[in-house]
Structure formats: C-alpha cells, structure tokens
Image: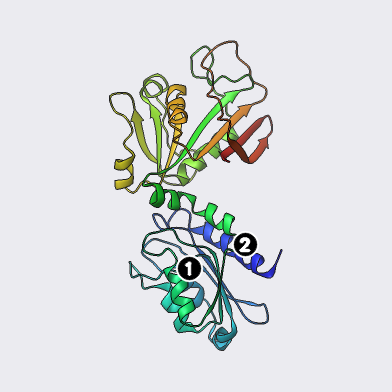
Amino acid sequence: MTEDEKYMRRCIQLAKNGQQNAKPNPMVGAVIVSADGRIIGEGYHVRCGQGHAEVNAFASVRREDEPLLKEATIYVSLEPCSHYGKTPPCADLIIKKGVRRVVVGCIDEFAEVQGRGIRKLREAGIEVEVGVLEAECQALNRRFFTFHREQRPYIILKWAQTANGFIDDHYQPTQISSNFTKMLSHKLRAEEDAILVGRVTEERDHPQLNVREWNGSDPKRLVIDHAHPLNLESLHAHHIQSLIVEGGATTLRSFLMQNLWDEIRVETNLTLTVNDGTRAPQIPANVKVTNEQQFDDHVIVTYSRL
C-alpha cells in the first residue's frame, strides 16, 4: 500500500460516518497530512447543509500547525466542489489555505462539479492527483452517482431462501433468516431510502418493513402491482436515492427481467429445506460476487454486474 492509498483509505473510513445524515449529499472524508507524514487535520461531511469534509478537516487543524499547510497534502475521497450550494465551494477554501498538493479519490459525477473543482485547483497552481483508490471511492457513493447519472434510485434486490431454493414453505410464510441475519436486514433498511414489495406479499404476509431490530429511520414503504406500477421518475423527483426490493418472487423477477437492478443480496439458510413452495428467482448469468459472509448456518452473498 502506498502512502497516498493509506491516507485515502482513512478518508473512506471517515466518510462512512456520514452515511445516515449526509444524504442526499454524498459521503466524503478528508485528511490533511504535513510534509513529514503527520496527520494534522481530519473531517467528514456530517450533515446535509453543514460544512463539507474539507471545511471540517481544516477546522480541526491546531493553530500551531497552520504554518505547515503550505507544504501539506489534503486527501479527499471525492472531488472538491466548485459551486455555491448550501455552502461555499471547497475548491476555493483549499486554494485560500494554500496547500501544496491535493489527492482526489474520484471525480464527482454531479452535473455542477464533474471536474470543475480539479480544474480550478490546477489553475491556481496546486498539484492535483486523481484516482487513488478510485473504485473504492466510487463504490462508497454508488447510490449518489446512480441517482444523478441514471435519474433513478440505486436498486437492491433482496431475498432469503432455503438450502434447496425456496422462499417460503408450501406457499406460506416461513422464517428463513436467523435472529442475527434478520437484524442485518433491518440495518440495511436503516441505510436505504425506500423499500418495496408486491401487492400479494403485502396482503399475504403483512410485512412491517421497518427497522425495529436496528437503530435508525424506517425506509419509505412502497407497494406495487399491475394497477400501481413503479414510477422511477416519481422516486427521483422525491429524492429517493436507494430502493430495496424485498419481493415476492413475481416482483423480484419483474425487476430482473427488465434488467432493473444494481445489486442483489441473497441469504441462504444452509440447514433448512422444504418440499414445495415458491421458487427463489434465478441469479442472472453476467454477475460477479462482491461480498460473501457466513453467520453460523446462514450465508449472505452480494452480487453486482460484471
């Protein structure tokens, strides 16, 4: 691991602290490092409408360390903004502070940024390097990027299945998840903006679709059927950046058939089998496993596109 990668990894760690409250803004972390390799400032975007990561990082620098800024490097997981929003441009602040070098994880795809911050820094004579841990920095804000690029939420298809591939027992609801993996499902709900099920699942299972097993806000509850299809434009207009689709099987297959998904999460209970019921959807062919975790007899696999 290079020195730049080490400090960028710290930026990513810091950025994740803003997962709940930075929305609808992206999660961003910033680290300021002196010429002798000492971290003299850190920050992240805590809450939408408040100071960005760079602002908080500079604010954390002790007065006696401020003379070190002229030879310092600031690491930022996302390109510094160059426009006036709820806060002034961070690129202007970096120029004003007079740091020698800026290392950026990835370019901001948001229409009002898209390289303008980097260009402004370079025009001011600051050395700028872009693309350190780029894939990880992009993945950190994949919901934000998908929302602005595709004009729709980031879509997560999710289901739990038995060891032999059923999502219920003789078409009746059955507990497939363990208490621990159920808690993880509620954690996911707390991290996403909305959750969707089909009308049949709503009427048959009466799912609560809340975060009672975790701390956080309940996602917006959505129910669809043929008479009330999903309107992605409406979700975009309501600033819903992420959507969990929890079923049932017909609803999940409809998203798969339309190729309308960004991530698939499947939990398998390795010890539970049933003789009949609703078959789980088939995983598409062109996918890759991005994460796999086992919790006792339960395995959760996350897939993304190749």
Quadrant in the rendering for residue 251: top left
Q: Is residue 23 above or below residue 294?
A: below
Give residue 16's position: percent from left, percent from top: 53, 57
Given residues 302 and 287, the one toward you in this image is: 287
Q: What crowding class fits label 1: few (fewer than 14 Cα within 10 Å), some (14-19), or many (20 or more)?
A: many
Kindly identify the residue that appears in the image at 52 percent across and 29 percent down. 159
Give residue 54's position: percent from left, percent from top: 48, 71
Give residue 82's position: percent from left, percent from top: 39, 71
Given residues 40 and 305, the one toward you in this image is: 305
CB within 8 Å, label 1 to label 2: no
- Quarter of the image with the N terminus in it: bottom right
Drawn side of residue 44 relative to residue 235, left or right: right
Cα distance in 3D space between marks 1 and 2: 15 Å
Q: Is residue 295 visible?
A: yes
Quadrant in the rendering for residue 133: bottom right
Kindly identify the residue that appears in the image at 59 percent across and 81 percent down. 72
Three-letter code for the amino acid on which mark 1 is drawn: Ala
Residue ID for mark 1: 53
Q: Secondary structure at mark 2?
A: helix
Given residues 126 and 95, the one toward you in this image is: 126
Quadrant in the rendering for residue 282: top right
Q: Is residue 92 above or below residue 9?
A: below
Give residue 286's position: percent from left, percent from top: 58, 34
- Quarter of the image with the C terminus in it: top right
Residue ID for mark 2: 9
Drawn side of residue 76 relative to residue 120, left or right: right
